[in-house]
């Protein structure tokens, strides 16, 4: 499938029936709509294929000067068929709408659910824009295609059989003449559909490049202006825009050639019918005029299902990459998840309430955390952590320090089980954490990330994120503890002020304070703070120090910081270098030792202390 190779639009293959069967199986809850559509499709074909015959009878009735009663009845029959046709069209549009919207809804829901379960590594590999397209355009494309394919398949095949039968019954010799156009029609249609498919794919591909350029242009407008790169950006845009123009023109020209050719081929069939049938009538043998009219109408209609089926098959090919990507996402098994053993234990624990036991039957309290011989790499062969040992004692606050890119955030991510060790293990109260529930662990961690994310909504909603129903007083209390109350109060709507998408209306330091308030409010067993106050000014940081210390007391805390004020109060400072802990101890002891910490202190901390 398409995992790991996001841009596979240009692969043109045959139709993968297994894949489509699996996509179709998502429509099972809407099988009644699908059955209604199949019946609708067949009935429409029956009604539509009767119209030329009735027209023929009517013409004969007029030519023969038959009784007015017969003409009236034929007229009534014709009108009834037309009304029936309209009702059936209404019926299948409703059924198709139900199937398409239901399928799109279910595919969207299932893909979003799966996305939420997937590990960080997956998001490291897939660009965000690519994932958003999966959830929006791919789901829509695949879901809207299915009903029309189903309908055209049932209608097209039935219609083709009925029209061919009618022509053969009216005059089999004439019918065989007309049918000689079928192979030509099939070849022309498939040839052009292939070409159109290719050019429309190129258009789509260029369009996504165009979107990416727009996106970069909008997101990076500040950097562009500050570096006066407008002209270069415009030239880059011009190239993509020109490519788009070229592919669009190719597609338009192909369409303009295809349609007249197909229509002409169809007309040849009608011409043959008119010529040969006309000769027969002139000779006074064979067809009546009415039946010639009917036959000619059938000859016109004959090309229709062939074209429709070819178009739907090519749509199916066009949407195959989208279907593959959605199914690939749905099939993706989350790499970090509860083992069967843990799930069994969680089932057994259902309904049991205990202060000492967690939802998975293990200890509810986190007393110690230990990294034993942990090695980790994002990319095979490039280890970030190598045989790391680290034991955190009950209620201890440890600080991780070290140069940039040395693996401090990685240690925190492993502790939070965003990633799992490649070798070795992490033990909570002496139990390897993969034997514990993921939900239990993460709901007991208060994590403040290096780049905190705020959601669109108010300040209060962001502080109380994940804790619905919590009182305003407690929100204010948490904000006050981390010195966020002051600036929030100064905002026009106070706690009800909107933070904007991603917290864009706040400064980075303000976002960090809100994320900190969120973590303090959650009152977790373990705090993990990764550069939680790196963008807060030194004075504010000095002020919040007391509040943070109060929050960290009596629980395990892992703090990563470049600033001395945050680090100094930790129970133990650990210096990380080359994927290992090279030094540890209190601030004073480490300075005294005159090793890596002292050097780091001299270079990084001295200025900020
Ligand atoms: N998602 C990722 N995929 C691949 N490599 C990564 C990823 N995240 C980090 N790395 C690499 O792993 C190494 C350690 O990164 P990490 O973020 O843990 O460093 P850090 O000590 O937190 O640095 P800083 O002080 O700058 O925050 C770096 O070399 C980085 O390039
Ligand atoms: Mg980091």
Image (tube, rainbow, N blue to C red):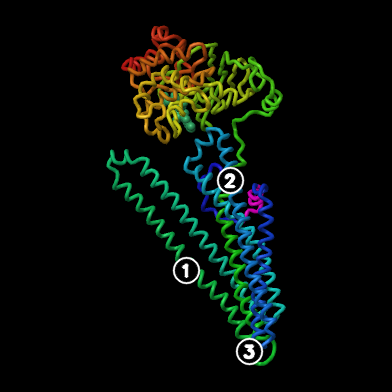
Q: Which mark is residue 43?
A: none
560 in relation to 55, above or below: above
Question: In terms of sequence position, does the residue under pointer 2 or pointer 1 come before the other?
Answer: 2
Question: In terms of sequence position, does the residue under pointer 3 or pointer 2 come before the other?
Answer: 2
Q: Determine which quarter of the picture holds residue 109.
A: top right
Viewer-proximal residue among 134 and 76? 76
In contact (CB < 8 Å): disc 3 and disc 2: no
Instruction: Say which residue label 2 marks.
Output: 105
Report helix, strand or loop for mark 2: helix
Report the magenta residues as a range: 15-25
Asked if the magenta segment contains residue 185, the reply would be no
Asked if the magenta segment contains residue 21, the reply would be yes
Residue 322: x %, y % from top left? 55, 50
The residue carrying pointer 1 sits among few (fewer than 14), some (14 to 19) or many (20 or more) residues within 10 Å by Cα, namely few
Instruction: Say which residue label 3 marks.
Output: 279
User: Distance between the Cα atoms at labels 2 and 1?
Assistant: 36 Å
555 in relation to 322, above or below: above
Which of the four quarters of the rendered structure image does ligand 1 lie in?
top left
Q: How many marks?
A: 3
- Whether label 1 lies within 8 Å of ligand 1 gets the answer no
203 in relation to 4, above or below: below
The residue carrying pointer 3 sits among few (fewer than 14), some (14 to 19) or many (20 or more) residues within 10 Å by Cα, namely some
The residue carrying pointer 2 sits among few (fewer than 14), some (14 to 19) or many (20 or more) residues within 10 Å by Cα, namely some
Secondary structure, magenta segment, majority class = helix
Instruction: Say which residue label 1 marks.
Output: 256
Q: Residue at x 51, y 25 (%)?
A: 413
Q: Which of the image's four quarters has the C terminus?
A: top left
Residue 42: x %, y % from top left? 68, 64
Q: Is residue 411 visible?
A: no
Q: Choose mark 3 or mark 2, whichever is in front.
A: 2
């Amino acid at each position: 499938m398409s995992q790991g190779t996001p841009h596979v639009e240009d692969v043109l293959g045959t139709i993968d029936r297994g894949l489509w069967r699996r996509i179709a199986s998502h429509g099972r809850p809407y099988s009644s709509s699908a059955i209604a559509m199949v019946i609708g499709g067949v009935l429409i074909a029956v009604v539509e294929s009767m119209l030329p015959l009735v027209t023929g009878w009517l013409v004969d009735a007029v030519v023969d000067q038959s009784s007015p009663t017969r003409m009236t009845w034929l007229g009534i029959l014709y009108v009834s068929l037309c009304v029936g046709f309209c009702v059936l069209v209404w019926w299948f549009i409703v059924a198709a709408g139900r199937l398409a919207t239901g399928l799109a809804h279910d595919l969207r829901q299932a893909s979003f659910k799966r996305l939420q379960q997937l590990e960080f590594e997956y998001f490291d590999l897939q660009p965000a824009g690519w994932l958003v397209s999966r959830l929006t355009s791919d789901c829509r494309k695949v879901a809207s295609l299915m009903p029309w394919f189903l309908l055209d398949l049932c209608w097209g095949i039935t219609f083709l059989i009925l029209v061919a039968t009618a022509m053969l019954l009216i005059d089999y010799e004439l019918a065989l003449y007309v049918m000689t156009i079928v192979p030509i029609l099939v070849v022309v249609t498939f040839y052009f559909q292939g070409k159109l498919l290719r050019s429309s794919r190129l258009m789509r591909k260029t369009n996504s490049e165009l979107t990416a350029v727009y996106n970069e242009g909008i997101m990076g407008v500040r950097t562009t202006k500050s570096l006066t790169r407008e002209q270069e950006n415009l030239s880059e845009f011009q190239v993509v825009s020109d490519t788009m123009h070229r592919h669009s023109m190719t597609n338009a020209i192909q369409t303009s050639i295809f349609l007249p050719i197909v229509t002409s081929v169809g007309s040849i069939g009608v011409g043959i019918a008119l010529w040969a049938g006309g000769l027969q009538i002139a000779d006074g043998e064979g067809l009546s005029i009415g039946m010639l009219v009917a036959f000619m109408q059938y000859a016109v209609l004959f090309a229709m299902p062939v074209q429709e089926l070819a178009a739907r098959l090519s749509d199916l090919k066009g949407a195959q990459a989208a279907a593959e990507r959605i199914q690939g996402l749905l099939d993706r098994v989350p790499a970090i998840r509860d083992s069967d053993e843990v799930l069994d234990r969680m089932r057994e624990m259902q309904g049991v309430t205990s202060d000492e036991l967690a939802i998975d039957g293990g200890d509810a309290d986190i007393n110690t955390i230990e990294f034993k011989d942990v090695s980790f790499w994002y990319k095979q062969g490039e280890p970030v952590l190598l045989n790391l040992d680290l034991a955190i004692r009950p209620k201890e606050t440890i600080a991780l320090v070290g140069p940039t890119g040395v693996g401090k955030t990685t240690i925190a991510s492993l502790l939070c089980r965003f990633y799992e060790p490649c070798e070795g293990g992490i033990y909570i109260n002496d139990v390897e954490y993969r034997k514990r529930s993921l939900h239990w662990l993460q709901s007991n961690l208060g994590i403040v990330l290096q780049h905190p994310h705020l959601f669109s909504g108010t300040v209060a909603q962001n502080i109380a994120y994940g804790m619905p129903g919590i009182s305003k007083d407690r929100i204010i209390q948490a904000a006050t503890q981390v010195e966020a109350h002051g600036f929030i109060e100064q905002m026009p709507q106070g706690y009800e002020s909107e933070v904007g998408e991603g917290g864009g209306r706040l400064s980075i330091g303000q976002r960090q304070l809100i994320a900190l308030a969120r973590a303090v409010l959650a009152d977790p067993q373990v705090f993990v703070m990764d550069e939680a106050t790196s963008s807060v000014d030194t004075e504010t940081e000095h002020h919040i120090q007391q509040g943070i210390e109060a929050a960290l007391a009596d629980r395990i805390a892992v703090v990563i910081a470049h600033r001395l004020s945050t680090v100094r109060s930790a129970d133990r400072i650990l210096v990380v270098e080359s994927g290992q802990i090279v030094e540890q101890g209190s601030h004073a002891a480490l300075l005294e030792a005159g090793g890596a910490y002292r050097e780091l202190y001299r270079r990084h901390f001295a200025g900020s202390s």
